[in-house]
Amino acid sequence: MAKKNNLSSKEIESPLKRLREDAGLSQQEFASRIGVGIATISRWERGASIAMLTVPQMKALCRILGKAIEELPDEFGPSKE
């Protein structure tokens, strides 16, 4: 019998998605403000690709989210658990 996973969807949700939604931004608004495509944001949030940001993009990300770089997660995709 398969073991049931007791993690809620919030516990395995992408930290980037949570931060973006907390800032009240759609994927489109967020992508536009940091200078990437909406498909890129989607891939980062799904964990399908690793975020490779330029310094200006990282500064914009921090400014938009109201976070210092030290407060950002190391991985933007969902937990692998």
Image (spheres, helix red, strand yellow):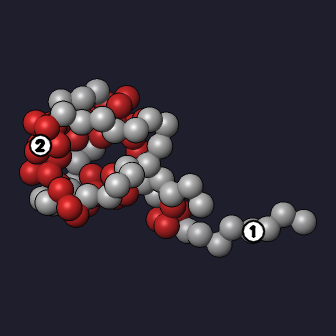
Labelled disc at residue 60: 2
Left or right placement of residue 12 versus residue 15 in this view: right
Labelled disc at residue 71: none
Q: Nearer the viewer, residue 28 or 4?
A: 4
The quadrant of the rendering that contains the N terminus is bottom right
Q: Secondary structure at mark 1?
A: loop
Q: Position of residue 5 (x, y in %)?
A: 68, 67
Q: Earlier in the sequence, mark 2 or mark 1?
A: 1
Q: Residue at x 75, y 68 (%)?
A: 4
Q: Residue at x 46, y 57 (%)?
A: 13
Establish if 58 lies above or below 71: above
Q: Residue at x 24, y 29 (%)?
A: 36
Q: Nearer the viewer, residue 6 or 52?
A: 52
Q: Position of residue 58 (x, y in %)?
A: 17, 43
Q: Position of residue 25 (x, y in %)?
A: 23, 48
Q: Secondary structure at mark 2?
A: helix
* Residue marked by disc 1: 4
Of the residues tagged 2 and 1, which is closer to the observer?
2
The quadrant of the rendering that contains the C terminus is bottom right
Measure how far apart labels 2 and 1 are at the Cα level: 40 Å
Q: Position of residue 39 (x, y in %)?
A: 37, 29
Q: Residue at x 47, y 65 (%)?
A: 10
Amino acid type, mark 2: Ala
Q: Nearer the viewer, residue 41 or 22?
A: 41
**Can residue 29 be seen at all in this image of the molecule?**
no
Amino acid type, mark 1: Lys
Left or right placement of residue 43 versus residue 31 in this view: right
**Can residue 14 be seen at all in this image of the molecule?**
yes
